[in-house]
């Protein structure tokens, strides 16, 4: 269970109070600059924040950075990589906070990479890959840090736009892997720009507008009125194969 | 290919490279000990050395060779660490103002000595250069503490401090007499002729700090992915950052203090190794030390043998040979395009 009470990041987010039970995939929606990244960074403990933030009744702020690295993983937005390094070395950095055997590490890396279809990339130079490819490698590194066979203590996964730069095939692959992690009790908080993917693949939606939480409910309650209010965008709501689909129409 | 095989291959590659570099270094040491105005042939080595030869080696060439190894290795190590720490492929000790700050105090001392007619001992210049490096370090850390410890902030502060020191040095040069000018210029171009008079225990802290820095490759690998990523993996960023900056400043301060300003080694050596190995800090950090030593030793041998009378400043040699090689590699392999 993740709960925030009177939580705020100076000049960026909140104050907001919200909670989610364990094992749910939460989608964080909101226009550019609405505070999604700040919220994720603050929950991860990378920037300072006020108010209460608890994961399973434990105050996250009391964790040391090493302790936090075992309990949660986060994928921050990608920064440019200038120096060459092999992909398998980047991915293997994900286990550095953990104390596990080399055999376990290599089998877990192979599992994660086969799920994300990255096995052919292991020997390539990370700095020479395209944006989407780098994103998938970093995602593999982040997943490895909380991969259940390696780290049974992990409880939370924070992802800042993990799907940015990925093609549809890989977007759905990632969301499927995340679904499996939540089924094993992991709480996943993902910032995302695609309403349809959020509605179809996430359990809960938290929607931010200028740092304020304007919606926090199950994904099927999300509707076109909210989209118009928050994103200033008219959408057409449609049903296909029993699934709600929003089609962007025009700005309002 | 399975991950175990990849790891195995990588381990082999590292070992081969490090062994090859070490072998080259040994050969270069032999050449450095043998060459000079008093030649020692290969046969002399195998047949046993005469008393004069032993004296030349022990008292003149060995200290100088060891100095070249220490300074070359130290500068390359600092470059490799700074490039990761500051997220900038052109970072090196000269760029973040340490060399300039050290030069400023050394030049000030030479200038003052000539102005008042006091004979300044070589160790005095070394000490003042080292103090200069320390002052710059303190200034850098103090100023960059306000606000976030960002890489670009530290880099820009360093550049600004470097420009300010260089301006002050130019002032001093302008008011110097001819003899002081000559001495200052020679010191600033870097020479290994200074350090050999210092006793061995001077080097103990230097070796200890280098050793500590060599063990930090895990943290550097995390830092290479960016400061957020490093923190998320449990790294105490502020503490690590401060420790690394101190270590780098200490080593490069020592290097400038003992051998003057030798540019280029810190910049080029880590890049050459990255082009060769495509490997992370676990390889580039130790390999930089060996390759830096090797490069400076070769440059020193050349600086002693190219001109028949006297010697060239070794900094000139490293820059003259190194720059074209580096440009060639950059043009041929687009490895640094970013």
Image (cartoon, grey):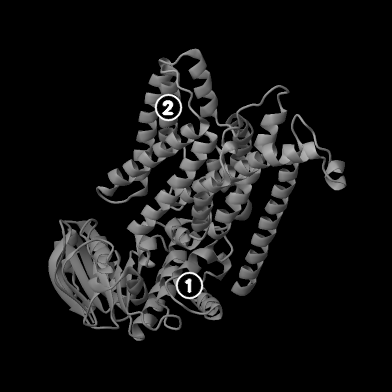
Instruction: Report the residue at 39% width, 82% height from top.
Output: A180
Secondary structure of the residue carrying tag 1 is: loop
Q: Nearer the viewer, mark 2 or mark 1?
A: 2
The percent coordinates of residue A129 (x first, y second) are: 51, 56
The percent coordinates of residue B134 (x first, y second) are: 39, 42
Please name the residue that numbered disc 1 is placed on: A116
Is there any visible trace of residue B96 in the rendered image?
Answer: no
Horizontal relation, residue B323 to residue A199: left or right? right
Q: Are callouts 2 and 1 both on one chain?
A: no
Please name the residue that numbered disc 2 is placed on: B109
Placement of the N terminus of chain B among the 4 image quadrants = bottom right
Horizontal relation, residue A169 to residue A213: left or right? right
The percent coordinates of residue A128 (x first, y second) are: 52, 54
Chain letter for the residue marked with disc 2 in the picture: B
Horizontal relation, residue A94 to residue B267: left or right? left
Query: How far, Cα to Cα, is label 2 from label 1?
Result: 62 Å
Badge 2 crowding class, 10 Å Cα cut-off, few under 14, some 14 to 19, many 20 or more, is some
């Amino acid at each position: 269970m993740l709960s925030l009470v009177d939580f705020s990041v100076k000049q960026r987010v909140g104050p907001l109070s919200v909670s989610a039970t364990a094992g749910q995939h939460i989608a964080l929606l909101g226009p550019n600059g609405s505070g999604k990244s700040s919220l994720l960074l603050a929950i991860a403990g990378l920037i300072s924040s006020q108010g209460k933030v608890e994961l399973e009744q434990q105050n996250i702020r009391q964790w040391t950075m090493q302790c936090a690295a075992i309990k949660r993983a986060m994928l921050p937005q990608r920064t440019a990589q200038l120096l060459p390094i092999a992909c398998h070395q980047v991915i293997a950095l994900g286990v550095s906070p953990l104390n596990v055997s080399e055999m376990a590490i290599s089998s877990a890396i192979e599992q994660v990479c086969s799920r994300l279809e990255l096995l052919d990339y292991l020997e390539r130079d990370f700095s020479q890959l395209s944006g989407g490819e780098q994103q998938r490698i970093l995602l593999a590194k982040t997943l490895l840090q909380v991969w259940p066979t390696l780290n049974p203590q992990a409880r939370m996964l924070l992802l800042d736009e993990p799907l940015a730069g990925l093609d549809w095939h890989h977007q759905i692959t990632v969301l499927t892997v995340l679904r499996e992690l939540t089924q094993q009790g992991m709480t996943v908080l993902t910032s995302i720009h695609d309403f349809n993917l959020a509605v179809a693949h996430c359990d809960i939606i938290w929607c931010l507008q200028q740092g304020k939480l304007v919606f926090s409910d199950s994904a099927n309650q999300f509707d076109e009125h909210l989209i118009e209010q928050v994103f200033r965008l008219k959408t057409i709501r449609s049903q296909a194969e029993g699934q709600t689909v929003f089609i962007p129409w025009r700005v309002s | 290919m399975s991950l175990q095989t990849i790891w195995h291959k990588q381990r082999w590659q590292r070992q081969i490279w490090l062994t090859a570099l070490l072998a080259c270094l040994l050969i270069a040491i032999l050449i450095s000990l043998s060459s000079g105005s008093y030649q020692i042939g290969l046969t002399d080595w195998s047949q046993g050395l005469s008393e004069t030869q032993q004296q030349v080696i022990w008292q003149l060439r060995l200290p100088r060779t060891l100095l070249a190894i220490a300074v070359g290795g130290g500068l390359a190590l600092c470059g490799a660490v700074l490039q990761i720490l500051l997220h900038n492929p052109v970072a090196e000790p000269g760029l973040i103002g340490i060399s300039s700050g050290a030069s400023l105090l050394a030049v000030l001392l030479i200038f003052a000595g000539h102005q008042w007619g006091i004979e300044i001992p070589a160790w005095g210049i070394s000490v003042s250069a080292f103090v200069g490096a320390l002052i710059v370090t303190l200034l850098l850390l103090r100023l960059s503490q306000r606000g976030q410890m960002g890489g670009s902030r530290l880099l820009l502060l360093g550049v600004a401090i470097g420009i300010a020191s260089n301006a002050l040095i130019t002032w001093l040069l302008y008011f110097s007499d001819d003899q002081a000018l000559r001495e200052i210029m020679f010191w600033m171009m870097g020479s290994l002729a200074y350090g050999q008079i210092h006793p061995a225990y001077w080097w103990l802290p230097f070796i200890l700090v280098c050793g500590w820095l060599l063990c930090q490759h895990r943290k550097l690998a995390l830092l290479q992915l960016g400061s957020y990523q490093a923190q998320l993996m449990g790294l105490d960023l502020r503490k690590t950052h401060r420790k690394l900056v101190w270590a780098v400043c200490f080593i490069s301060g020592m290097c400038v203090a003992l051998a003057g300003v030798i540019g280029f080694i810190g910049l080029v050596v880590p890049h050459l190794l990255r082009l060769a190995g495509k490997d992370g800090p676990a390889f580039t950090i130790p390999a930089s030390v060996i390759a830096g030593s090797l490069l400076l030793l070769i440059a020193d041998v050349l600086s002693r043998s190219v001109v028949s009378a006297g010697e060239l400043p070794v900094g000139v040699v490293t820059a003259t040979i190194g720059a074209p090689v580096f440009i060639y590699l950059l043009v041929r392999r687009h490895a640094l395009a970013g």
